[in-house]
Image (cartoon, grey):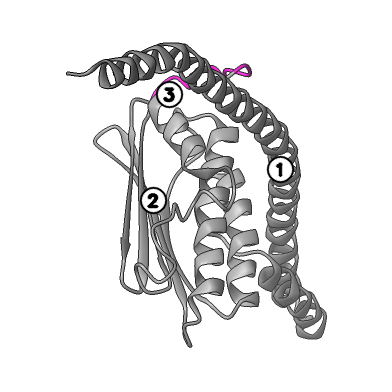
């Protein structure tokens, strides 16, 4: 090896030795920035989650009030019919029709029912069919705010997928029930052809993103499964029922 080649190799090694620590430091800064951005994102979404939950809780309480009022009015209508006052009873029953059409009963959990009612309206407005089979009660051992965020985000994504699909008859199918100690939620919606826009996270652009749902599943010793296919997108969430875990506000 001549002197020139030897000097070139030595100089190259020296440059690499100097650059390596700088490259490592840059990588560490990028990682720190990403961690900071994620923390800020989670903090913003937690605040949004609380505000949305408060509104949904208020809607649920209003629905409960309406149902109580309906029971009273139905009893009054029956009493009037028993007294032979059919016209008065008919007026009461006509008024009930409007109230019944404004709120549908999807499940026994008031908060989840309020969320589904709102998102079912979003489906109708974007021309998507909506099928719902949810069997949940009030006491499933899962924090109400988490249930609110779970159903809201999954359904928000489903509605967005329908809008973006370009399909003539888009649809959303939602099911949820407790099986073998786990809440199992599955949602399937119409979506664009797989690979049309390249690989992407369908939930990352809507709601709180897959990270939020994965974190929730992890807190409940559960899991999250997604399956994009040609013309459909499916998400399945498993949450273990039992004592609700505490929220980590500094996540």
Instruction: Indicate whether residue 245 is drawn in magenta.
Output: yes
Q: Earlier in the sequence, mark 3 or mark 1?
A: 1
Contact (CB < 8 A) between labels 1 and 2?
no
**Residue marked by disc 3:** 219
64 or 131: which is nearer to us? Answer: 131
Q: Quadrant location of residue 126?
A: bottom right
Contact (CB < 8 A) between labels 2 and 3?
no
The residues tagged by marks 3 and 1 sit, at their Cα atoms, a distance apart of 21 Å
In percent of the image, x 75 and y 65: which residue is there?
76
The residues tagged by marks 1 and 2 sit, at their Cα atoms, a distance apart of 21 Å
Bounds of the magenta segment: 242-250
In percent of width and height, residue 162 lies at 51, 72
**Residue marked by disc 1:** 52
Up-down: is 214 above or below 199? above
Instruction: Indicate whether residue 133 is drawn in magenta.
Output: no
Quadrant housing the C terminus: top right
In this picture, residue 18 sits left or right of residue 87: left
- Majority secondary structure in the magenta region: loop
Up-down: is 119 above or below 183? below
In this picture, residue 52 sits left or right of residue 140: right
């Amino acid at each position: 090896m001549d002197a020139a080649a030897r000097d070139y190799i030595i100089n190259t090694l020296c440059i690499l030795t100097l650059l390596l620590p700088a490259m490592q430091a840059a990588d560490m800064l990028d990682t720190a920035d990403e961690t900071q951005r994620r923390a800020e994102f989670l903090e913003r979404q937690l605040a949004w989650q609380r505000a949305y939950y408060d509104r949904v809780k208020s809607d649920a309480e209003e629905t409960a009030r309406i149902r109580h009022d309906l029971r009273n009015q139905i009893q009054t209508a029956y009493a009037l019919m028993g007294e032979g006052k059919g016209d008065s009873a008919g007026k009461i029953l006509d008024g009930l029709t409007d109230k019944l059409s404004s709120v549908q009963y999807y499940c026994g959990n008031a908060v989840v029912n309020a969320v589904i009612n709102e998102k079912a309206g979003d489906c109708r407005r974007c021309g998507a069919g909506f099928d719902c089979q949810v069997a949940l009660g009030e006491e499933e051992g899962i924090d109400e705010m988490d249930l609110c965020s779970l159903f809201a985000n999954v359904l928000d994504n489903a509605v967005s997928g329908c809008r973006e699909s370009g399909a003539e008859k888009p649809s959303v199918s939602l099911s949820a029930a407790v099986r073998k100690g786990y809440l199992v939620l599955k949602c399937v919606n119409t979506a664009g052809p797989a690979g049309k826009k390249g690989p992407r996270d369908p939930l990352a652009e809507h709601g709180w993103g897959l990270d939020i749902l994965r974190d929730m599943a992890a807190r409940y010793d559960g899991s999250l499964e997604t399956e994009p296919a040609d013309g459909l997108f499916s998400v399945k969430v498993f949450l273990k029922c039992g004592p609700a875990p505490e929220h980590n506000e500094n996540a």
